[in-house]
Structures are given as C-alpha cells and as structure tokens.
Amino acid sequence: MEEEEEDALESLNELSVASWIREANVELGSCFRIELPIQVGPPKRSAQTVTWKSGGTEIPKGALFYPSCGRDLSHAVANFGEAADSLHFADAHVSPSGSPVGNLPRTTVSVPHVGTVVSMEPEERELNVDGSVVHFHASDGLVALVRRVPDLSIFYYRGDSPGEGGSNQRWLEPVLFHYVLERLMDGGLIVTDGSNCGYYDEDMDIVAPWNRMCPNKPDLTDSEAPYFEYAHREFQLICELEHPRGTVAAWQVRAATT
C-alpha cells in the first residue's frame, strides 16, 4: 500500500500581498490620506552605523519605533536607548503621562488586511524615561509611523493581540509587515515576541516565510533555523532578550547578497 504524502507548504506570494495592499489603500486613502507602497523596494542604506552592544552587531543609525506600546517603555529604552538615534512610542489609548486617553473625539476604522486604525487628534510629547529622551505619540501607530517617525533602525513590537485589550493592528501580518520592511534600513532589527504575526492559509497550505518569527504558526521548514529569506532580504536571529512578561527575539534584516 502506497503511503500518502503530506501536502507541502507553499510560500506566500508577494503578488498576493500587493493585491491586499491595494485593497487596504482604498480605505486608508479615503479615511487617512495614507497610501502604502505596493511593492517593497530594496532597503535604504544609512550613512552611519552604531554598535548595538547587547547583540554584538552594527546597526544603521536611525529611529526605534514601538507601536501599541501601552505603558511598556522601559525594556526597549534599556536595551536600545544607546543604539537608536531617536526613540518613538505610539499608542492610541494611552496619553503621554501614561494614563488612559479618555473620551477624546475618535473613530475607529476597520481596514482590510490591516485591522483597526484610529482616527484622532494626535498628541506628541518628549518624556524622560530612565535617562533617555523618548517621543511619545498619543496617536494611532500606523498614522504615527507614516507621518511622524524617521526611517527605522529598530522596529520593536510585543504584547499585542487582535482582541481582548489588544490594538487589532496587524503589524507583523503581510500588509503592515511589508511596510515595516519598506521603512527598516539595511541592517536594522525587528524585535518581537511574535504578536499579530505571520500568515497561514489552512485550505491552500500557504504560509509566510517569516512565520519563523511567529510562535504557534507553521513555517516552510518546520525547523528552528535562525535564518530565512524574504523580499530580497536575509533575516538572521541575533539573540533573545528577557522581558518581565516573556521573551523577545531580535532579528537583523539585511539586503540579500544573491
């Protein structure tokens, strides 16, 4: 009797993501005057690099951005305050003082393939956190990144969810993941616990190559290899950092050499 072969997992096609970005742009354009790039271009290069001592690697000189951060500022500042050129945190539901925003005028928009985007009057303030100056944006995270944050050396994202108090903004699912790659400079870091991450079509057995960064999602190799490629970029696991509420992994993203 012949053994049944399991269906092999297929890699998510960038053309599929491009079509989803176009769908998202319809709503983003009409409600927020935002248009995300349809295709991911090659990573920008920074004229300067700095040494990230904890990871023992050189990263481009640029901004750290942490969307949907809540009051969770100290870990990112402690680990990247000296490496980042500027530190940017955004949350639509927390004021710069750390208290809930309250009943300020706002509307929420459900954007296809992105999740919830909040329309509100943004507020930005500089704070001193553990000896470092940070820019806190009381604003929707996507709106803040598009309009207020320079190009990235570090994208930091943890502790979020699609519900139960989470932002429902799908930062590491295909559409916004592509935008993060567009903004992350060559050699920059993605630091994450895998929140709102990856892609898996159970019917078609299609997965995102970056599911390796996402807990509890199948990947192409079903391995723990600390390396994968996607969108003409190489992703290398540098280290894991202990957080008071779990672990985050730091992945370095470089332009592919082949």
Image: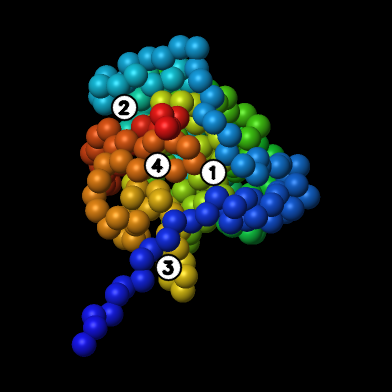
The amino acid at mark 2 is: Asn
Count of numbered circles on the image:
4
The amino acid at mark 1 is: His
Image-based side of 166 in relation to 5, left or right: right
Name the residue located 44 percent from the left edge and 43 percent from the top edge. 230
- Picture quarter with the N terminus: bottom left
Label for residue 79?
2
- Picture quarter with the C terminus: top left
Counting residues from the start of the chain, the first of labels 1 and 4 encountered is 1
Between the residue at mark 3 and the residue at mark 1, the CA separation in whole angstroms equals 21 Å
- From the image, state whether disc 4 or disc 2 is nearer to you: 4
Q: Which residue is mark 4?
A: 229
> In the rendered image, which quarter is residue 52 located in?
top left
Height in image: 247 above or below 170?
A: above
Between the residue at mark 4 and the residue at mark 2, the CA separation in whole angstroms equals 26 Å
- From the image, state whether disc 1 or disc 4 is nearer to you: 4
The amino acid at mark 3 is: Asp
Kindly give the residue lying farthest to the bottom in the view shown.
1
Name the residue located 40 percent from the left edge and 48 percent from the top edge. 210
Residue 148 position in % (x across, y down): 62, 29
Image-based side of 3 in relation to 124, left or right: left
CB under 8 Å between discs 4 and 2: no
Q: Nearer the viewer, residue 117 or 39?
A: 39
Residue 90 position in % (x across, y down): 53, 37
Q: Which residue is mark 1?
A: 178
The amino acid at mark 4 is: Glu
